[in-house]
């Protein structure tokens, strides 16, 4: 899987660029037993019509999704993920 993270709104040229990356990964990295590489463009926002036209004739599995930024991790996930000290300890790093 190839994921491309964009800081702004989706632009049609992103689809062509990711299509290029998928071809390169399929040719140079993918093993014979692997399935075709999937591409995902994550953008701050997207226009559904623009995305539809940009992806219409691309034959590779490629998708576009919007993301939202949060200042805090949702409460339901706070107990599921390690904090900075736990990560540092596992990486044998010293914390201040």
Image (spheres, rainbow, N blue to C red):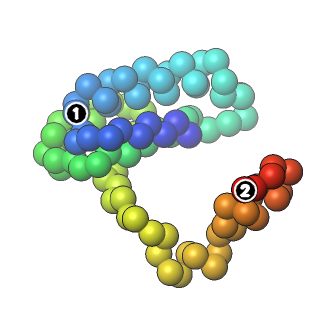
Residue 91: in sight, yes or no?
no
Quadrant in which residue 59 is drawn:
top left
Residue 63 position in % (x across, y down): 37, 44
Residue 16: in sight, yes or no?
yes
> Foreground: 15 or 83?
83
Between disc 2 and disc 1, the foreground one is: 2
Instruction: Return the disc, 2 or 1, that comes first in the chain's sequence.
Output: 1
Residue 57 position in % (x across, y down): 27, 30
How far apart are the two marked residues, 2 and 1, measured between alpha carbons? 42 Å
Q: Residues within 10 Å of mark 1 (few under 14, many from 20)?
A: some
> Foreground: 92 or 44?
92
- Residue underneath mark 2: 96
Give the side of residue 72 with respect to residue 94, left or right: left
Q: Which mark is residue 90?
A: none
Q: Residue at x 63, y 79 (%)?
A: 79
Residue 49 position in % (x across, y down): 13, 45
* Residue at disc 1, secondary structure: loop
Q: Residue at x 49, y 70 (%)?
A: 73
Q: Residue at x 31, y 29 (%)?
A: 14
- Residue underneath mark 1: 11
> Foreground: 83 or 56?
83
Q: Is residue 53 above or below residue 77?
A: above
Instruction: State the residue lying farthest toward the front.
Output: 96
* Residue at disc 2, secondary structure: loop
> Foreground: 44 or 14?
44
Q: Quadrant of the N terminus?
A: top right
Number of callouts: 2
Residue 7 position in % (x across, y down): 32, 41
Instruction: State the residue lying farthest toward the right.
Output: 92
């Amino acid at each position: 899987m190839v994921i491309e993270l964009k800081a702004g709104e989706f632009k049609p040229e992103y689809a062509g660029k990711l299509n290029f990356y998928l071809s390169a990964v399929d040719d140079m990295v993918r093993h014979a037993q692997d399935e075709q590489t999937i591409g995902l463009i994550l953008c701050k926002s997207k226009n559904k019509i623009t995305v539809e036209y940009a992806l219409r004739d691309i034959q590779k599995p490629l998708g576009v999704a919007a993301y939202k930024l949060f200042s805090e991790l949702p409460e339901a996930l706070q107990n599921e993920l390690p904090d900075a000290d736990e990560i540092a300890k596992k990486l044998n790093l010293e914390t201040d």
